[in-house]
Image (tube, helix red, strand yellow):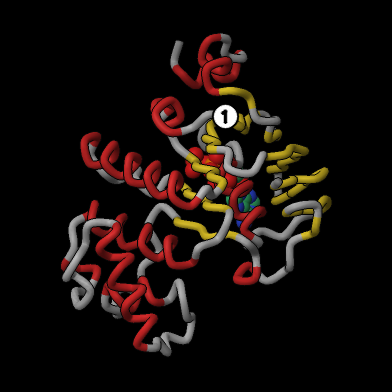
Amino acid sequence: MLTVDQLRIEMGDFSLTGDLKIAPGARVAVLGPSGAGKSTLLAAIAGFQPLNAGRILWNDTAMPNDPAARPISMVFQDNNLFPHLTVAQNVGLGLRPNLRLSTDDHAYVAQALTRVGLEGMGDRKPAQLSGGQIARVALARVLLRDRPVLLLDEPFGALGPALKSEMLELVRTLLDETGATLLMVSHDPQDARVLCDQVVLVADGQALAPVATEEMFANPPEVMREYLGG
Ligand SMILES: Nc1ncnc2c1ncn2[C@@H]1O[C@H](COP(=O)(O)OP(=O)(O)OP(=O)(O)O)[C@@H](O)[C@H]1O
């Protein structure tokens, strides 16, 4: 269980509060207007954003301060790859942040690359990959990190619709295999319908408790109606 307990964040004029629980294995879309605080919520859960009040807990225990020690892997919009490292090294960072990979580690990296459809591409640099392939590298790293919570901050926003739906399918397959809990920020409410069983709405300075995706779309609250453009 992921718990956002009495969270409060203040940055200048902006403030965000939240008090919610995410069940293990849930697939949650984080939706809301631009600037509402979706990325801030994910950064707080990941440990990159200091809190003014409240706690983030995993299985009823407060998470460590160090983001690397949290039971979390996160993919950002730019897929956070290092341009000077090869694909295999970028993925290997998920296992060993110092990149001292054993023979077994190299084999795990190769397996993860195969798993996301990038067999044999380990020696390339990110600049030699397409946008979809870069997103796959980020997911291969997530696979190797093998953490119970996956945070995706609009990682496929730059991809065209066909490629994006391919990536959402790959995420679904990986979640089926790992049972990880997903929180995914998206600007496209359709992503929620495709992949997520619940929606956390972030609006008016608040991250609301998760609601079933079906219910959210059948009976959207006003801010969601504005956001859906209807
Ligand atoms: N360092 C900062 N100081 C003050 N305000 C900040 C700072 N960083 C971000 N903000 C504000 O915090 C708010 C939340 O930003 P955040 O990126 O979390 O929103 P978002 O919902 O993810 O937006 P988008 O959908 O546009 O990506 C924004 O209004 C932003 O201007």
Decide: is 119 above or below 157: below
Decide: is 3 above or below 224: below
Camera-nearest residue between 149 and 40: 149
The residue under the point 20% across, 78% down is 123
The residue under the point 72% across, 42% down is 15
Report x, y in % for residue 63.
74, 61
The residue under the point 48% across, 80% down is 97
**Element marked by disc 1:** strand
Within-10-Å neighbours for mark 1: few <14, some 14–19, many 20+:
many
Q: State which quarter of the image contains the C terminus.
A: top left
Camera-nearest residue between 183 and 17: 183
Residue type at the position of mark 1: Val
Report x, y in % for residue 226.
52, 16
Report x, y in % for residue 12.
70, 49
Report x, y in % for residue 85.
30, 79
Q: Is residue 196 left or right of residue 171?
A: right
Q: Is residue 81 left or right of residue 218?
A: left
The residue under the point 74% across, 49% down is 10
Q: Is residue 142 left or right of residue 203?
A: left
Q: Is residue 150 left or right of residue 119?
A: right
Q: How many marks?
A: 1
Q: State the residue position of label 1.
A: 199
Camera-nearest residue between 13 and 203: 203
**Whether the residue under disc 1 has CB within 8 Å of ligand 1:** no
Picture quarter containing residue 207?
top right
Picture quarter containing residue 211?
top right
